[in-house]
Image (cartoon, rainbow, N blue to C red):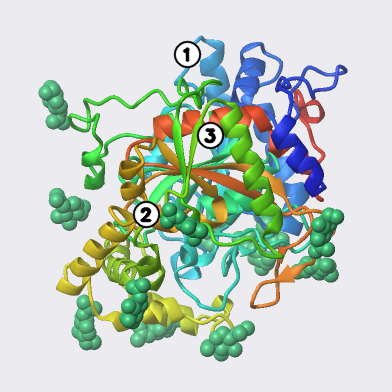
Amino acid sequence: MISAWSIVKALAFAPLTSVYAQYGKSTKLPLLLDATGEELTTGLEAGQFTSVDLVHAYVARIREVNSTLHMVTEINPDALQIAKELDEERSKGKLRGPLHGLPILIKNNIATADQMNNTAGSWALLGAKVPRDSTMAAKLRKAGAIILGKANLSQWANFRSSNSSNGWSAYGGQTYGAYYPGQDPSGSSSGSGVASSLGLAFASLGTETDGSILSPSQLNNVVGIKPTVGLTSRSLVIPISEHQDTVGPMARTVKDAAYILQAIAGPDQYDNYTSAIPWALNTTHYTVPNYVAACQFDALLGKRIGVPRNAIGTRSGTTAPIFDAFESALIVLRNAGAIIVDNTNYTAYASYLNSTAEDTVLGGDFGPNLAAYLSQLSYNPQNVRNLFDVRNFTQTFPPEEYPSRDTAVFDASLALNTSNTSPEFWAAYQQDLYLGGEGGILGALDTYSLDAVVMPTRSASGISAIIGAPVITVPLGAYPANTTVVTNARGDLNVTAPGVPFGISFAGRKWSEEGLIGLAYAFEQRTMVRREVEPYVKPSVELVNVLGR
Ligand SMILES: *[C@@H]1O[C@H](CO)[C@@H](O)[C@H](O)[C@H]1NC(C)=O
Ligand SMILES: *[C@@H]1O[C@H](CO)[C@@H](O)[C@H](O)[C@H]1NC(C)=O
Ligand SMILES: *[C@@H]1O[C@H](CO)[C@@H](O)[C@H](O)[C@H]1NC(C)=O
Ligand SMILES: *[C@@H]1O[C@H](CO)[C@@H](O)[C@H](O)[C@H]1NC(C)=O
Ligand SMILES: *[C@@H]1O[C@H](CO)[C@@H](O)[C@H](O)[C@H]1NC(C)=O
Ligand SMILES: *[C@@H]1O[C@H](CO)[C@@H](O)[C@H](O)[C@H]1NC(C)=O
Ligand SMILES: *[C@@H]1O[C@H](CO)[C@@H](O)[C@H](O)[C@H]1NC(C)=O
Ligand SMILES: *[C@@H]1O[C@H](CO)[C@@H](O)[C@H](O)[C@H]1NC(C)=O
Ligand SMILES: *[C@@H]1O[C@H](CO)[C@@H](O)[C@H](O)[C@H]1NC(C)=O
Ligand SMILES: *[C@@H]1O[C@H](CO)[C@@H](O)[C@H](O)[C@H]1NC(C)=O
Ligand SMILES: *[C@@H]1O[C@H](CO)[C@@H](O)[C@H](O)[C@H]1NC(C)=O
Ligand SMILES: CC(=O)N[C@H]1CO[C@H](CO)[C@@H](O)[C@@H]1O
């Protein structure tokens, strides 16, 4: 664990240590808690280990901690065979892409056309089959990644209940964070965050509608990229809202996340929101910015970065460590050559806090979007066709733990009795575009000629969510040892506790990921906070234990 003082010190004065510096001299094999994609690829290329070794090691690590943390619901029974094929390709000099042979976990709402189930954590979808891989899974495979398994999540991506717990799904059980016993892992991409954090795979994919990548990334001490809605295809991803859903990487470093975004971004014939990608002529002729090359140490130099003070809340007893670390981070940004423009407030923020427009948009999208997903299933064992069926199943199938965990969000969505073609829906969506746009982040970016805004991750998701704009979170610090433990409303998770991590977020205009990645990388390289925050539970298996098995 780390004290508040050492975090602040690390932020303000951290010397640059090489990412290799922490590896013991006794072994040249990367240690899996922090191994980067480039380190793993170097080892694979040098023949130090194989992708089969990587799969063995990661599976063993998952098995070591899963009974405590429940972060992985299924391991891909084909993973070893796929690794073997990729090893053979590598030995013949054939590389599919920069992710060749790297194992990745994906959230249990991103479908694969293989032996794994895609359930959003619900028993209603156990055994259901999809006609093809989701576009995300297909792109990962094309880039050479091994889909290692499915990560647990807040059930239905947290769009079911008003009194459930973050990281709980009926199918996957309760996910816990690794930084304090019973830690709230946040959600809804809970297992993705925990797994990336503990080195249970190279990295993971999460999905976000409003906070579901950013929040579990910060609480689990990893980097999360919430891409612009439409940059990554949602085809065959169990939806909440076509207007706000997006898929993005959760990884231990900004550059690892950039490599994954590079592989998954781009237009898709199955998701027409991707046709808005500005660099895409059509689904076969397109370019994507070089997100990996955007990882430049001097990327902050001369950049104008705003602080929307009225949108980041106030320093209190519980939030003091976050606010103090945030102020130190502003010093780091300034020292790196950024121009910090303070009080770039969001003019309509009070109305945003007061607005129910987002509920109308999400509730209006959910019914039709869910029905559209279900209609694509090639096998639907419970014959659930729409939200009515799913609610009935949830309320009558005992493992769904109803009514202890209610269906209030389903109920509200059905009670709205709107769909996303109703006039009320359109009015609400237009209100969101104003509240998040001219009255929110876009207004601030224009008024103050900013490249981005920066804020504590706890406040970063909402305004960008309602306009579909991107945000990146990077580790910032952790709660000090004298923190008083606070539980969630249900009383089954520890939310605030010693050692629980938190993050800082960079947010910008739609399609501005390339610039944001640069800012996040330049900040990360100057601070390297992740390495300072220690999980209380850690798997012990390393590559050395599985070599040649
Ligand atoms: C994870 O843990 C749960 C609960 O202990 C168990 O049922 C499940 O099979 C485990 N999953 C894996 C992939 O080991
Ligand atoms: C998917 O669910 C089916 C039905 O319960 C089960 O038989 C199968 O083992 C599951 N797949 C995996 C990879 O766990
Ligand atoms: C929460 O932390 C307390 C100690 O502060 C511990 O006794 C309790 O078991 C934890 N909760 C869970 C769900 O593990
Ligand atoms: C986008 O695709 C959806 C379903 O795939 C379809 O219902 C909708 O009409 C399409 N919209 C446009 C503008 O093409
Ligand atoms: C995409 O655009 C290119 C260049 O105009 C064209 O050659 C190609 O046929 C187009 N592909 C599709 C699927 O429309
Ligand atoms: C911005 O918001 C902060 C916090 O609410 C407030 O103290 C400050 O006066 C505001 N500044 C401007 C320029 O509106
Ligand atoms: C908040 O909502 C109430 C009731 O709709 C309204 O009277 C009030 O003006 C709103 N406040 C803001 C800041 O929009
Ligand atoms: C509700 O779900 C149960 C299974 O949990 C099923 O037996 C029943 O037929 C369903 N009722 C309706 C009205 O669909
Ligand atoms: C959750 O809500 C349901 C329905 O209101 C209620 O029956 C149940 O007691 C609640 N559970 C908890 C743990 O609060
Ligand atoms: C509204 O409610 C009616 C009556 O239950 C139902 O037939 C209709 O499908 C609902 N419309 C929407 C858009 O949910
Ligand atoms: C923890 O210690 C710090 C530094 O000594 C102090 O400022 C802070 O008030 C303490 N917090 C609690 C909750 O006791
Ligand atoms: C598929 C799976 O892993 N299911 C298990 C998830 O965890 C709960 C309890 O934590 C078990 O009851 C499930 O069998």
Question: Residue 94 — which label?
Answer: 1
Element assignment for label 1: loop
Kind of residue at badge 1: Lys
Kind of residue at badge 3: Ala
275 relative to 352, above or below:
above
533 relative to 283, above or below:
below
Viewer-side residue, 198 vs 229: 229
Identified at 82% across, 39% down, the residue is 540
Identified at 64% across, 60% down, the residue is 315
Element assignment for label 2: loop
Kindly report the distance in space between the C-alpha atoms of the residues bearing marks 2 and 1. Answer: 35 Å
Disc 2 CB within 8 Å of nearest ligand 4 atom: no
Among the two numbered marks 2 and 1 on one chain, the one whose residue lies closer to the N terminus = 1
**Quarter of the rendered image showing ligand 3:** bottom right
Residue 409 visible in the current orientation = yes
Image quadrant holding the C terminus, namely: top right
Kindly report the distance in space between the C-alpha atoms of the residues bearing marks 3 and 1. Answer: 33 Å
Residue 33 visible in the current orientation = no
Identified at 60% across, 60% down, the residue is 186
Q: Position of residue 299 (x, y in %)?
A: 49, 24
Rate crowding at label 3 as few (under 14), some (14 to 19) or many (20 or more) other CA atoms within 10 Å.
many
Among the two numbered marks 2 and 3 on one chain, the one whose residue lies closer to the N terminus = 2
* Mark 3 or 1, closer to the camera: 3
309 relative to 5, above or below:
below
Question: Residue 245 — which label?
Answer: 2
Asked if the residue at tag 3 contacts the one at tag 2, i.e. Cβ–Cβ closer than 8 Å, the answer is: no
Among the two numbered marks 3 and 1 on one chain, the one whose residue lies closer to the N terminus = 1
Kindly report the distance in space between the C-alpha atoms of the residues bearing marks 2 and 3. Answer: 22 Å
* Mark 2 or 1, closer to the camera: 2
Question: What residue occupies the far right of the structure in this picture?
Answer: 26
